[in-house]
Amino acid sequence: MATTQTDSSNTPMPHIDTTCPKCSGTMLEGYTIDKGYGAFFQEIWLAGRPRSGWFGVSVPSTAVPIPVSRYRCENCGYLEFYARKEFKMK
């Protein structure tokens, strides 16, 4: 079953097939979070390879973060990850 998602401004988002490629179950949208010092953040995607920094991964000031959303199959638990600007927190 394929659907087209819409953000809060009713702008159509790119098509995401919500049928599990492993078992044909239904994929549900969700997210995972990154835990920082005393806070939780939406996971992001950055181009390139990670580099070690003083407090973990060093993020270059020129990096363009893209929010990540995930789809999980209700039946088998398979996860798919998508990085799109449309997934920015509201």
Image (spheres, rainbow, N blue to C red):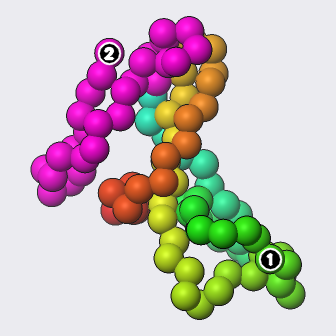
Q: Quadrant of the N terminus?
A: top left
Q: Is residue 88 magenta?
A: no
Q: Which residues are magenta?
A: 1-27
In the image, is 9 to the left or to the right of 2? left
Residue 21 at what x, y percent from top left?
Answer: 52, 18
Q: Secondary structure at mark 2?
A: loop
Residue 59 at what x, y percent from top left?
Answer: 67, 81
Residue 20 at what x, y percent from top left?
Answer: 50, 18
- CA separation in Å, label 2 and label 1: 40 Å
In the image, is 8 to the left or to the right of 40? left
Q: Is residue 81 above or below residue 77?
A: below
User: Measuring 66% from the left and 61% from the top, which residue is drawn there?
Assistant: 34
Q: Secondary structure at mark 1?
A: strand
- The numbered mark at residue 51 is 1
Q: Is residue 82 above or below residue 56?
A: above
Residue 74 seen in the current view: no
- The numbered mark at residue 10 is none
**Residue holding disc 2:** 1
Residue 80 seen in the current view: yes
Taking the view exactly as shown, the residue that stands out farthest to the front is 48
Q: Is residue 2 magenta?
A: yes
Mark 1: amino acid: Arg
Mark 2: amino acid: Met
User: Measuring 80% from the left and 77% from the top, which residue is drawn there?
Assistant: 51
